Image (cartoon, grey):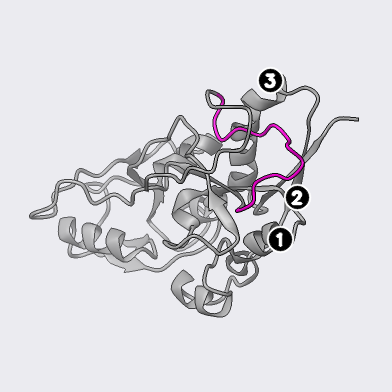
Amino acid sequence: MGDVVRIGSRASKLARTQVSEWLAPLVGQFPEVTFKREVILEGGDQDRVTPTLAEVAKTAGGSAFSTNQEAALVTGKIDVIVHSLKDLPTAVTEGTTLLTTPGPREDVRDVLCGATLAGLPEGATVGTGAPRRVAQLLALRPDLNVVPIRGNVPGRLARTTKGALDAVVLAAAGLNRLGLTPEIHEVPRREVPGATDLTRRAREALALTCPATGLTKGTPCPSRPTTSPRLSSRRSNR
């Protein structure tokens, strides 16, 4: 019987798609290995009421989207986690190692979904909870009513057709991975004075974490298809 690698991720469709993206080249390279998926709910998944993720993180052990997965990693319940790099805290959790970022990376840009900037009526309501996005939108259209919004990608998109929002701002990376870019959309030009690129770095990249001691089984599980067929201990350059 071959080795088993237990892969942790969140439950969302995007999280599961990211695991599939990472696994696709590995299954053929290591036919003797069984890759088993383990879904782990995080504070940000369970708490859909608290307005901001920063508030959720305070009650979720420091991170809204990685605390429970990393606890499972440290205690040996899983062997590796596939994250979106943007969801990880700046400091690496004790007992874990951040691996080399696997490629290729996705589009780093924001997308206005459900409308174009010019097509939005005066005072239109746009959903986004990110302070950076709020500032950029209001720099381009000070008349907009920008409101916080949380939830998965399909749910936020649905609020432009079934809810009270005229548009939402989402990451191109998630839309592309899920194949959900709407027919009416726009990638706003960055016209914030003094800034040429205010996108949130790391959201287009996947992140892999494993125990700081590595895989004691010696199971082949590369951080990217072109690296050594063993877990790397190199950290990603974020």
Q: Is residue 127 left or right of residue 223?
A: left
Q: Which residues are magenta?
A: 212-225
Residue 215: percent from left, percent from top: 70, 44
Residue 98: percent from left, percent from top: 52, 49
Q: CA distance from mark 1 to mark 2?
A: 10 Å
Categorize mark 3 by other alpha carbons within 10 Å: few (<14), some (14-19), many (20+): few
The amino acid sitting under disc 3 is Gln
Label 3–label 2 contact, CB within 8 A? no
Q: Secondary structure at mark 1?
A: helix
**Magenta highlight: main SS:** loop
User: Where on the picture, by quarter, is residue 71?
Assistant: bottom right
Q: Report which residue position mark 3 lands on.
A: 29
Residue 21, placed above or below residue 38: above
Label 3–label 1 contact, CB within 8 A? no
The amino acid sitting under disc 2 is Glu
Q: Earlier in the sequence, mark 3 or mark 2?
A: 3
Q: Is residue 221 magenta?
A: yes
Q: Secondary structure at mark 2?
A: strand
| In-front residue for pair 120/18 | 18
Q: Report which residue position mark 1 lands on.
A: 72
Residue 24: percent from left, percent from top: 64, 27
Q: Is residue 201 visible?
A: yes
**At x 64% / y 51%, what residue is drawn?**
213
**At x 73% / y 53%, what residue is drawn?**
39
Q: Is residue 8 left or right of residue 183?
A: right
